[in-house]
Amino acid sequence: MVPELEKTYDPKSAEERWYAHWEERGFFNADPRSDKPAYCITIPPPNVTGELHMGHAIQHAIHDMVVRWKRMQGYETLCLPGTDHAGIATQMKVEQQLAAEEGLSRYDIGREALLERIRAWRDKYGDAIYHQLRKLGSSYDWRRARFTLDDAYAEAVLQAFERFQERGWIYRGRRMINWCPECRTVISDLETEERELNGSLWHIRYPGLDGGPDVVVATTRPETMLGDTAVAVHPGDGRWSGAVGRQVLLPLAERSIVIVADEYADPEMGSGAVKVTPCHDPNDYAIGERHGLAHIQVIGFDGVMTEEAGRYAGLERYACRRQLVAELEEVGLLVNTVDHLHAVPHHDKCGTVIEPLPMEQWFMNMEELAQKTKPVLTSEQVNYVPERFRGYAVEWLDNIRDWALSRQIWWGHRIPAWYCLHCSSDGLIPMGGLDAEKAFAEGSFRVSVADGAKPHVSVCQPDRCPDCGRADWVQDPDVLDTWFSSALWPFATLGWPREEAELDYFYPTDLMITARDILYLWVLRMVMTSVECRGQIPFRTVLVHPTILTKDGRRMSKSLGTGLNPLDLVELYGADATRFCLLAQAGAVQDVRFDAEIENNVVTSSASAEMGRNFGNKVWNAARFVLMNLQGYAPEHAVRGAELLPDRWIWSRLSRTIAEMDERLHAYRFSDVIRTLYDFLWRDYCDWYLELAKGRLQDERAQERLPVQANLVQILETALRLMHPVMPFMTESLWQALPKPERAPESIVVAEWPRLIEDDIDEEAERDMARVQEVVTAVRTIRSEMNVPPSTRITVLISVPNADVTADMERMVPFISPMVRASAISVGIEVEPPAASGSAVVGNIEIYVPLEGIIDLDIERARLQKEIAKFEKLISGLNGKLGNEQFVANAPAEVVEKERLRLVEYSDNLQSLRDSLQRIA
RNA sequence: GGGCGAUUAGCUCAGUUGGUUAGAGCGCCGGUCUCACAUACCGGAGGCCACUGGUUCAAAUCCAGUAUCGCCCACCA
């Protein structure tokens, strides 16, 4: 009747078998018509191009732990998975493939054909991440998996866009933007990443014209000088007071440009004069606006010099830079070159250096929405863990900037703006030499409001042009920033803009677990859109998980060779061990140095995961032991034993463990949760209770055996439930194997979370058991240091100060004896120590282990001397403290009293140690 | 330039509101195949709690500063 367990736990078979079973039984499916309280998490959707990395792994280990915990607590839990279409990243991937395999660009095959290929790619690879998440054990409602580009989602995106537009926040305009010459699209400020580069600072002389002064300017980007249209000096800079309004010669371009006075020029920097390139620098653009300077764009959207660059046209921007520097040097206008370390913005997706360019784009003014959102943060409607991230969020809202919404790519939600072919034709410019018809058909044209294009925003194609009455429309060629759609994630996935039961029941969601790097980019934008579209917060708590680094503190990255595929860990150690070690390291810290050896993106071993595996194996074997010792046990008649010290103690410890688990889970202190489980199961249950149970399990008499069996089973069963959210697979295997009453739930997944039983807490048992443990450890130390072989039985004498203690100790003796392999233990008041014995003191008792003929007196003397030295040091410390009048006068009375008692105890201990040493001197 | 985090044993980390002798796992040393587990058991060694000041009777813990590493924000040529 009792199933046989393997000697070691085999994760692979358990994982496959149980996951399929759970899914088939529908345990992960959520029902919005339930009468239970709701608990909901919409997971941060990974990119469809994504492969599971350690950041995901820790995030999902947390997700699933919380969700399983809540499910067991009786909540109707929904953990909703999904993926993000990740416009730029996905399109980039498919374009790269297209180039590599067919030598074609997206412009060669056109919009529809490219989209077709991306869809095919997604069909093939898009679900990969779901399978990876299943391997981790994630208990998500897969029926509800959403994709940010599916039809229903598109409805939400259009709805939101229209709403923001009606508010007057969305506009099309010409502004300085971040352009990625590689991806050929604009990106938002948040998608740029500053990287420190070793560059140069070139000082260049611009000769004065008509007797005006020469000007020396410094630049990190000489190629932009071809687009210079002025030189600026500070209006208060005395050195240049006469120069404003004069002309200088722009070298190599052989143009004359004017010197203007502008506050931006910093007199402290170099000569105090700065070159002004309105088209290629955000600051210079602003100067240009103030002084009405001409715009000369010399770098094109492809990163190649334009016709405006004259004879440099056609040169790649860095080739042009090198050539310009060489030519300047030749003509003697390069004053000097200094090494210069500076931060340069790069595109976070492809790593290309951003080109700031003035361009017409769609923007969203965030000012009003930010102000509307601020109160839900400051009033703490949204809870941040750790709390400090709230402040950063508020600060970001206070300094909010307009959001560049449009992207010049094809994979995404098309901007719902329409142009009348007749009224707007001047502003619709076919691209790449396409004829107009084809360009419009494919959306391959550029829009210029300045040149006369007039957008009509509408969720679907408008009927007739309100201006000319005709009905020939073309849609805006751009798509929305991916983050625009993901900003709607928590409510769009639950059915918005339709009023679905899910939205009503599960919204606001409960928990958003995220990495730090998308707190603004994504998390805060979700709060903003929810405040606007739903009038409520999207989630109650934002939990920021740590970043996982390598053991030596480097980034985990495939290109560095430091990448770690979490599924490799699952392969090596099992999903449970992987989850265990991830959670063990998920404390309140910013970074985790993951304890694993990695070579060329392959993990060879992980001390941390081994700990998880070993823990699982330990519990597995404890269960195996219990199952092997259940002769005569019947769950329906099982009555737990609570008479003897170890029994009272283990029930007390279990209660404390339950309390601790609840407290630590509520505080999201996962590393503490792990420690609680580890200490209870390994240290308390295995090391002590199980060892002490062995004797009674051998007992012939059923009335002696059955209560212990009941305890072993019931404690383990409860502990398995506590463990289940961390190690779902192994706990299910064991839980199924344990004998349970008839009406037990069918799976640990849906079993009830253990409840604290206050009455089980037994202070006295805990104190006594602690004393047992101290004595056992002291005797074992003597055995070990005296090299007493494990097979040799010993006798132990315990000397106590009075009769009360005698009674206490005599109760404990039966539990000390088997743990130290003693043939006899006697307790007496102030007993005469045997001649040749090892000795130790524990609190107010002395322990002697007679070792006639075995004891090595030199070793024992050394041991005693060491102990004596320890107590001497403690006592001198205490004497100093208690001799200090300030301490006695100011410290709380109970602290002083405690120290006094310690001094007495230590002095007694010291005395008996000295006596022992005396006897063998 | 501004803000934040970290610094505790050889390694990876705990240490809640200041108050016994600062803990764990791995690694190391010694001893055990003791009938659940060698992925185990028993014992041991190992720490000026980054540094300097300060507050306090009392500081790993609170405050100030310094150093090193890391993160975020910022348009400085």
Image (spheres, coloured by chain):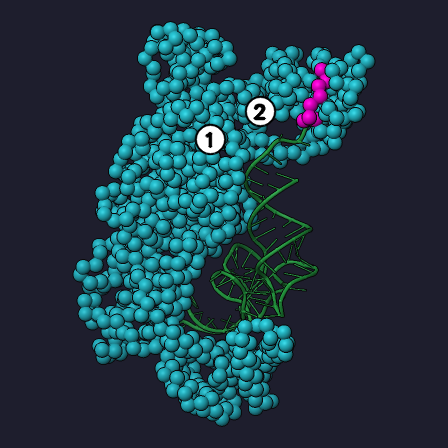
Callouts 2 and 1 on one subunit: yes
Depth-wise, is mark 2 or mark 1 nearer the camera? Answer: 1
Colour applied to chain A: cyan
Across and down, in percent, residue A804 comes to 41, 87
Q: Which amino acid does label 1 sit on?
A: Glu
Measured in 3D between alpha carbons, the distance from the residue under mark 2 to the one under mark 1, in whole angstroms, is: 29 Å
Name above or below for residue A425 compared with residue A727: above
User: From the viewer's perspective, is A100 left or right of A466?
Assistant: right
Residue under numbered circle 1: A368
User: From the viewer's perspective, is A673 left or right of A787?
Assistant: left
Q: Which region shows up in magenta?
A: A258-265
Quadrant holding the C terminus of chain A:
bottom right
Tell which of A211 and A677 is nearer to you: A211
Q: Which chain carries label 1?
A: A
Q: How many labels does the image show?
A: 2
Along the polypeptide, which appears first: circle 2 or circle 1? 2
State the residue lying farthest toward the bottom. Answer: A832
Name above or below for residue A57 compared with residue A895: above
Colour applied to chain B: green
Name above or below for residue A297 compared with residue A92: above
Asked if the stretch drawn in magenta spans residue A170, the answer is no
Residue under numbered circle 2: A355
Mark 1 closeness class: few <14, some 14–19, many ≥20 residues within 10 Å: few
Q: Which residue is drawn at 42% across and 18% down?
A: A477
